[in-house]
Image (tube, grey):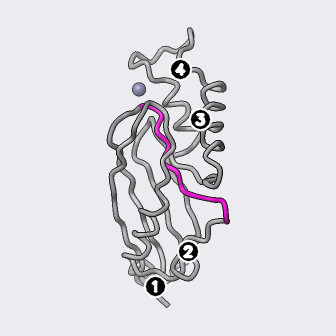
Amino acid sequence: MVARVGPLRYMRGMHTTTFDVPTPSRDAMIDITPSIAAAIQEAGASSGLVHIYVPHTTAGVTINENADPDVIHDVLAGLDVAVPHRQGFYRHSEGNSAAHIKSSMMGCGATAPIVDGRMALGTWQSVFFCEFDGPRTRRVIVTVMGEAS
Ligand code: ZN
């Protein structure tokens, strides 16, 4: 049974924005934290949630360390070892099965809390767009669900 909370009052606090991300290579992780922060500011939310969605089947989004760039290098290298670009058993005719698998491993969405108008990321965390079949131009959809104080 779904509880009724009134005539969609909570929908007033929803704000959606999209932006494009040009990616430089077949595999890459790009810090998109500033664009998410701008979307939160534009929405005027001081508390709530932000959802980041990647509408692609060979890309993803994840939150991970941005202090040491070697972490991103190692994440991409580790994914390459776990999911090699070529495998004899791949059937998908486009030849990008590894990208599809990595996309599902990272996921196409991420959510973070908004506190005092900012994403409540940990000290070392950033939001990364994950490219696995680039270079190309990708899209990110940001939904801010929140209230102004
Ligand atoms: Zn494909």
User: Can you identify the residue that label 2 sits on?
Assistant: 114
Magenta residues, dominant SS class: strand
Q: Nearer the viewer, residue 82 or 66?
A: 66
- What whole-number distance in Å separates the C-alpha atoms at marks 4 and 1? 51 Å
Amino acid type indicated by mark 4 = His
Marks 3 and 4 sit apart, C-alpha to C-alpha, by 12 Å
Q: CA distance from mark 3 to mark 1?
A: 46 Å
Judge whether residue 132 is colored magenta: yes
Q: Which residue is mark 1?
A: 6
* Disc marking residue 85: 4
Q: Are marks 2 and 4 in contact (CB under 8 Å)?
A: no
Q: Quadrant of residue 47?
A: bottom right
Q: How many marks?
A: 4
Q: Earlier in the sequence, mark 3 or mark 1?
A: 1
Q: Nearer the viewer, residue 27 or 48?
A: 27
Q: In x, y percent, where is residue 51?
A: 49, 62
Q: Residues within 10 Å of mark 4 (few under 14, many from 20)?
A: some
Q: Is mark 3 within 8 Å of ligand 1?
A: no
Residue 49, horizontal then vertical, whole percent: 53, 71
Name which residue type carries label 2: Ile
- Asked whether the beta carbons under mark 1 and mark 2 sit within 8 Å of each other, the answer is no
Viewer-nearest of discs 3 and 4: 3
- State the SS at label 2: strand
